[in-house]
Image (cartoon, grey):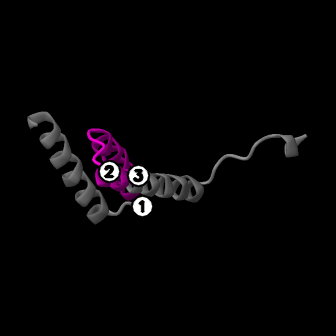
Amino acid sequence: MSDALPRPLSRERIIFAVKWAASLVQILGYTATGFGWTPLNLYLFLLGVFGWFAVGALWNDKALMLVHLVALGAMIAGMVSG
């Protein structure tokens, strides 16, 4: 009976999934930029940056968090002012 129950995801598997999903979304953002698909590219970048910030938080990596927090702030400021 216990084999039928799904196992909870481990912390490492969650981080792995978020890391690769955020990377894929950022690559899509670069692709959208290359084709001039605005504002879709900005929304993709926002998702990717937020995802990498979450990875930094899960890893307790302050440098990774800082870089992505600054990028997130700059992108939001640019979107609001533009």
Q: Quadrant of residue 62?
A: bottom left
N-terminal of the pair, mark 1 or mark 2, is 2
Name the spot of residue 52 as percent of width and height, x first: 37, 55
Q: Between marks 3 and 2, how big is the CA–CA gap?
A: 11 Å
Q: Residue at x 64, y 49 (%)?
A: 9
Where does the image place residue 27, in percent across and percent down from the top left?
40, 57
Instruction: Say left or right for 82 vs 56.
Output: left
Which span of residues is magenta-colored?
28-57
Which residue does the numbered mark 2 point to in the structure image? Answer: 35
**Residue occupying the point 39% across, 49% down:** 51
Disc 1 + disc 2, Cβ < 8 Å: no
Q: Residue at x 46, y 55 (%)?
A: 24
Kind of residue sitting beneath label 3: Leu
Q: Considering depth in this image, is 51 or 66 the residue closer to the camera?
A: 51
Find residue 31 and report its horizontal and vertical position in percent. 37, 54
Tell me the kind of residue under disc 2.
Phe
Q: Judge left or right: residue 26 versus residue 69.
A: right
Q: Amino acid at mark 1?
A: Trp
Label 3 vs 2, first from the N-terminus = 3
Question: Is 7 within the magenta?
Answer: no
- Mark 3 or mark 1, which has the lower sequence index? 3
- Badge 2: residue crowd in 10 Å (few <14, some 14–19, many ≥20): few
Determine the secondary structure under disc 2.
loop
- CA–CA distance in space, label 3 to label 1: 24 Å
Q: Which numbered tag is attached to residue 13?
A: none
Label 3 crowd bin: few (<14), some (14–19), many (20+), radius 10 Å:
some
- Which residue matches tag 1? 59
Q: Is residue 20 above or below residue 3?
A: below
Report if residue 42 lies within the magenta region.
yes
Q: Residue 32, image x and y in percent?
A: 34, 49
Comparing labels 3 and 1, the label whose residue is closer to the camera: 3
Q: Which residue is mark 3?
A: 28
